[in-house]
Image: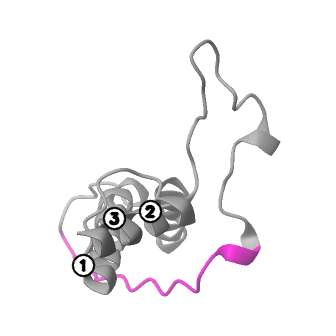
Amino acid sequence: MSNQIEGGLIQSLSWSLKEEVKFDDTQILSTDWSSYPILTFSEIPPVDVVLVNRTGMPFLGTGEASQGPTSAALANAVFDATSVRFRRLPLTPERVKQGLEDKNKA
C-alpha cells in the first residue's frame, strides 16, 4: 500500500510541476517522450508514507487517493510562500516567475 501512495504522490507532483501537452493552432507538439516533460528520478523528493491501521474497515483504494490532495497541497504551499494564487497547472518556473512579476506590478 505504501508503494501505491508514494507512486500516486510522485505522479501527482509530475502532473503539477511539469506535465503538459503542448500544441499550436493546428497540431499537438508533444508527440514523444522527449517533447513531453515528466518528473525524473533525480527530481523526486524524499517521501515518507505513514499508514494508519484501520482494522475492520473496508479497503477503499490507496494510490489514487493521494493524487488530488498532493496537487492541492503543493498549490497551497506555493501560495503561502508567494501570496500568489496559481490556478493553472503545471506550476512551471516560467508561470511562477510571471505570476510573481504580475504581483509586483500591482
Residue stretch rendered in magenta on the structure: 42-56
Three-letter code, disc 3: Asp
Q: Main secondary structure of the magenta part?
A: loop
According to the picture, the residue beneath numbered tag 3 turns out to be 102
Q: Is residue 48 above or below residue 37?
A: below
Q: Position of residue 20 (x, y in %)?
A: 55, 43
Mark drawn on residue 83: 1
Asked if residue 62 lies left or right of residue 27, the reply is left
Quarter occupied by residue 101: bottom left
According to the picture, the residue beneath numbered tag 2 turns out to be 98
Three-letter code, disc 2: Gln
Disc 2 packing (10 Å; few <14; some 14–19; many ≥20): few
Circles 1, 3 touching at the beta carbon (< 8 Å): no
Q: Residue furthest left?
A: 57
Quarter occupied by residue 18: bottom right
Q: Is residue 24 above or below residue 56?
A: above
Circles 1, 2 touching at the beta carbon (< 8 Å): no
Foreground disc of the pair 1, 2:
2
Cα–Cα span, label 3 and label 2: 6 Å
Asked if residue 59 lies left or right of residue 9, the reply is left
Residue drawn at x 76%, y 40% as measured from the top left: 35
Quarter occupied by residue 79: bottom left
